[in-house]
Amino acid sequence: MSAGPVSATEQGAAPATATGRCLCGAVTFTAERPVRVSACHCAMCRRWSGGPYFVCEPENVTFAEGAPVGTYRSSDWAERGFCTRCGTALFYRLVETGAHYLNTFTIEDLGEPDFALQVFTDEKPGFYSFAEPTKCLTGPEIFAMFGAGEKDA
């Protein structure tokens, strides 16, 4: 999803804690406030989220104990998390590393992160585009970056 996290600490600022929740409020979490946002245009993310899936990769993600989080294993290496009550898409998580790519719009005190990256641009429909300049990677470029063969995301 991203080309690697850039934490607030790496940018020279003290990390700030952000809070987030699903639509119904049954799932809450805390995380380091993200400094950048990415968009995934793959067919699976678009089907799951209803459009491009905007994610951030904060550190120290902690979901409230007992939160009704369900997961769906969407590939050999990743799963998608959602609220089992309202269905909010919460995260994409790499199984091997545990890295969370949170749904950007579940974060309540988001701040002003940079829109830095778009992935699976080769799968993006032609009827929308973003004006912000970002780095753009195709599916094959992403898989090569992570050393994986082309598979479902």
Image (cartoon, helix red, strand yellow):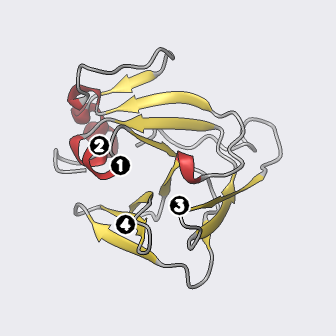
Q: CA distance from mark 3 to mark 4?
A: 25 Å
Q: Position of residue 48 (x, y in %)?
A: 30, 52
- Foreground residue among 142 and 127: 127
- Amino acid at the residue labelled 3: Leu
Callouts 1 and 3 close, C-beta under 8 Å: no
Callouts 3 and 2 close, C-beta under 8 Å: no
Q: Residues within 10 Å of mark 4 (few under 14, many from 20)?
A: some
Q: Position of residue 122 (x, y in %)?
A: 22, 26
- Amino acid at the residue labelled 1: Ser
Callouts 1 and 2 close, C-beta under 8 Å: yes
Q: Position of residue 83 (x, y in %)?
A: 45, 69
Q: Earlier in the sequence, mark 3 or mark 2?
A: 3
Residue 49, label in figure: 1
The N terminus - image quarter: top left
> Which residue is located at x 83 percent, y 46 percent?
14
Horizontal side of 3 relative to 37 (left or right) equals left
Q: CA distance from mark 1 to mark 2?
A: 5 Å
* Helix, strand or loop at mark 3: loop
Q: Earlier in the sequence, mark 3 or mark 4?
A: 3
Q: Earlier in the sequence, mark 1 or mark 4?
A: 1
Judge whether 80 appears above or below 5 on screen. Answer: below
Q: Earlier in the sequence, mark 1 or mark 3?
A: 3
Residue ID for mark 4: 95
Residue ID for mark 2: 46
> Which residue is located at x 54 percent, y 66 percent?
24
Q: Residues within 10 Å of mark 2 (few under 14, many from 20)?
A: some
Q: CA distance from mark 1 to mark 4?
A: 20 Å
- Foreground residue among 48 and 1: 48
- Foreground residue among 24 and 88: 24
